[in-house]
Image: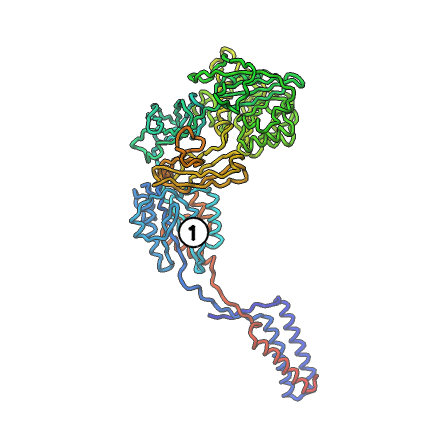
Amino acid sequence: MQSLILDPLIPTALWLVLAFGGAGLLTWYARTSQAKLSRGRWLTTVSLMAIALVLPLAILLNPTWLETIPPPAGKPLLTVFVDGSGSMATADATASDDTATVDDGQTRYQAAIGIAKAMQQLDDQYEVRVRRFDSTSATTSIGELETKQPEGNLTDIDRAIEEVLHEDRPQGQAVLLLSDGIHNAGGSARAILKTASKAKAIATPIFSKTIGGKSDVKNLSIQPLTPQQLTFVSQKVPVIAELAHQGLSGRTVDVRLFRDDQQLDQQQVDLDSTGRTEVQFQITEDANGLYRYRMEVAPLGEEVTPADNRATLLMRVIDQPIRVLLLEGKPYWDSKFLMRKLAADPSIEMVSVVRVADQRLMKRTLYRDAPAGGDPASPSAEGKPEVDTTLEDPEAGSPAVERLERWEIINNAADVLADGEELSRYQIVVLGRDAEVFLGETAVDNLRNWISRDGGSLVCSRGAPAAQINERLGRLMPVLWTRTRESRFRVALTEAGRELRWLPGQQAPAAADPLVGMPSLSTAEQVKKTKPLAIVLATSVSKDGTSALPVVSYQQYGTGRVVVVEGAGMWRWAFMPPNYADQETVYATLWHSLTRWLVSRAGLLPGQPLAMQSDKVSFSTTETATATLLMREASASGQLPRIELSGPALAEPKEFTPKPLGDDPGVYRVVFGSLEEGQYQVRTLDDPAQSIDRASSEGSTAFDVRSPWSEKLDVDARPDLMKRIAETSGGAMLDAADPDELAEQFQEHLTRSRPPRVRRTTAWDRWWVLLAVVGMWAITWGVRRSSGLV
């Protein structure tokens, strides 16, 4: 269909001025020329001049022919997504007054199929396409939907929507999302909303219908707080697991501990009203190696799933001691008590160097008797060492260990950290105050390499280790200091610190903080700021009880850690008055736990050429299983070992090749891919005849692969997310999911986003119009010339 409109090229007022001006001039010209020409020639000349004037004026009005363009062939596309994940099996679908397709008591999945079936009524207006999704999505039919059950392990709303946004539909398209809104496939709601914004950009509104509501789920799960631990031969180590429970408060359950298939211990645990209860076992192993433990809680018949009633724990037992180097710029009570507590731990070999005067430092070496053949990491036993038999043992039940002690005088503090190879024999270096005499440029460089490459841990036991922190040393520190007048403060753990369970009596995050009642500490320095990657484990507490500045903080530096403990006077925690006898163990346990925490996360022990660590103890079947191989630079310069993966779920062992991880030397990633459910063992194949045994555990690790169960536990519908998806995409959240309501809103969207298209053709685009104007002007000029008027 065509129509003609006027779209003036110039303002109407200007056009009228030109029109009246031209008409006036033409009238004046006609009157003055009437006497010069015969009547017939005069009428012809005036008429031609009038036509020549009207034609440009008419073109200035811009006559435009409008021609309606027919819409693209085909129907607009309506994609109906039906959620087929496990949470849709929940039978809490509820009918509203306007939703005749949903019956009370239906599962969410059945309700979604009913709505999708009702949308088929719109196939005379739209191309209705049905897709089923969980972790993936695919086109299906109503008949196929009815033959399947909602068994998907994950819900990936983002991926489902993204997969239909690449199709170009000039006729228009929309999406109807039928789901409970539980997105658990990774990524945050921000990623989904970004995809919804993309849908809006290509004019694809998402109309959502939330199916289901809140559900009363009863379930019980167990999870060790530290799934991978490091301990020492014949030492008791506490293993703490958390029981998380829903709707089961007041019940009593049996928790069992297994090593392989042998039951080691059993406890009865009362489930409290907080929803989280802790259980603790004591483990002791007499031989070094890698041990796999399993914790199980007896299932209750009311649980949604028993799949999370067991958890795996890996314990790596070693017979090598922890080697600690303690450096003090002056004798202090703090250093004396700290050395005494560290020396009392039979698993620690310690070297302490204290400057007692200029060019005079006292070096004390405490070590276990070296085995036959010698231990290259142990101090030389030249001279006549003293047998130290007076050490107190902080761990009841641990065997007494006879150790040797040596004293010597050294004259140059700079020599202590000058040898990088000697430094690599230690796992922990503790810096006291006034330690700048030890921290020359070479020493700082050696410390930095030792922390980042060897996985060493640097502990500043009383705040800033030097009066002036230069730039090279400051890069290692997790905090920045500023000088201030001396002040006193008490200490309280942060949430991150409480989760580490370092202190006795702290059986849960909500338990009372044992540090708050300890004597106050003093400091003449104040933390100015913490660095972006620093984690604060404890803060100071002011007189009104509010937390203030960081007291214990750390940051990762390469493969190692740097820990800062603020404040002097902590020795008083080890010398409590009689009325605080119940808190006497806090000091020893705090440092004992700190050293274990640092060493358990160390990569390579002294003299250890390589170490294999699984990145997680338990992977799901939807995840990529990975492990990390650490190798010393000398070992990494040669050929990389092959990695073997074995387990009952594999028909035969598979071999993998490690790949470098980033720019860190000696760090490699082993990717095993997605695996079937089961238990797996990993070992290096330096020697093809090497067997998987506990004695060669440094090159081996293990992990589990289990089917995910979150879809059966997290079943509370998310109407908030569904509403945000709809609004962000330009759609709407439907209350009743009625086909007529959806069709009306979809049509309104099409009207707004795709108005009728027309083709505009102006007079200037027609060649004959321009030819007529030019021809009329030429004829008029010729007639006037022949009449003697030109």
- Mark 1 secondary-structure assignment: loop
Residue 274 visible in image: no
Looking at the picture, tell me which residue is in the foreground, 231 or 253.
231
Q: Residue at x 44, y 64 (%)?
A: 71
Say how many tags the image has: 1
Indicate the position of residue 368 as horizontal and vertical percent values.
Answer: 50, 19
Q: Position of residue 160 (x, y in %)?
A: 41, 49
What is the quadrant of residue 435 in the picture? top right
Q: Nearer the viewer, residue 414 or 256?
A: 414
Q: Which residue is mark 1?
A: 163
Figure quadrant of residue 479? top right
Quadrant assignment, res 54: bottom right
Q: Is residue 194 left or right of residue 212?
A: right
| Farthest top residue in view | 578
**Which class describes the residues within 10 Å of circle 1: few (<14), some (14-19), or many (20+)?**
few
Residue 397: percent from left, percent from top: 42, 17
Quick one: 210 or 312, which is closer to the camera?
312
Q: How is the image coloured?
A: rainbow
Percent across and percent down for residue 718 are 41, 41
211 or 353, which is in the foreground?
Answer: 353
Q: Amino acid at mark 1?
A: Glu
* Lateral position of residue 590 relative to residue 475, left or right: left
On-image quarter of the C terminus: bottom right
Does residue 705 lie above or below 17 as drawn? above
